[in-house]
Image: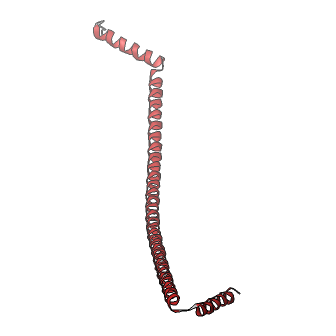
Amino acid sequence: MEFHLDATFFAFVGLVLFLALVVYLKVPGMMARSLDDRADQIRNELAEAKRLREEAQHLLAEYQRKRKEAEAEAAHIVAAAEREAEMLTADAKKKTEEFVANRTALSEQKILQAEAEAMKAVRSAAVDLAIAAAETVLAKQADAKVQSELFGNAVSQVKTRLN
């Protein structure tokens, strides 16, 4: 057998030397370690992504619960405000009715008082007129003796009323 030193032989020798150099420099171990590190990194990233996803779902559920609670509280606040508005409206209506009733009663009382004062003024005017007429009639018909007796009677009546 004869060895030929042709290009194929040198390519084979180069390949063997390259593989020996690769094994000597521990390239397969470095590659395996690099791949293992990359796999660990990917595994860690996946675990972190899973943890973040679970945390996001938890936060989403919590925010949805809080939103529902806030909506329920808002509904309670609106209902309470409506009830309070109804109460205030009823109270205002009641107070208005009371005010109108009081003003009506006061007006009626003033009217009655004005009527009483008018009646008193009419009576006073009638009494004054009757007194004036009586004076005129008595002055024309009564003599001095009758006038003296009437004056005495009037003075005695005034004294008894004042005492």
In percent of the image, x 45 and y 19: which residue is there? 23
Query: Which colour scheme appears in the figure?
Result: secondary structure
Q: Is residue 5 left or right of residue 66?
A: left
In percent of the image, x 44 and y 35: which residue is there? 42
Q: Nearer the viewer, residue 7 or 5?
A: 7
Q: Is residue 5 above or below residue 156?
A: above
Q: Is residue 86 above or below residue 22?
A: below
Q: Where does the image place residue 34, in percent across and percent down from the top left?
A: 46, 26
Q: Nearer the viewer, residue 45 or 81?
A: 81
Q: Quadrant of residue 18?
A: top left
Q: Quadrant of residue 72?
A: bottom left
Q: Where does the image place residue 100, in percent across and percent down from the top left?
A: 44, 72
Q: Is residue 51 above or below residue 21?
A: below
Q: Where does the image place residue 47, in percent across and percent down from the top left?
A: 47, 41
Q: Where does the image place residue 66, in percent across and percent down from the top left?
A: 47, 54
> Which quarter of the image is occupied by the C terminus?
bottom right
Q: Quadrant of residue 2?
A: top left
> Which quarter of the image is occupied by the N terminus?
top left
Which residue of the protein is positioned furthest toward the right in this rendering? 163
Q: Nearer the viewer, residue 150 or 122?
A: 150
Q: Is residue 54 above or below residue 137?
A: above
Q: Is residue 163 left or right of residue 14?
A: right
Which residue of the protein is positioned furthest toward the top in this rendering? 5
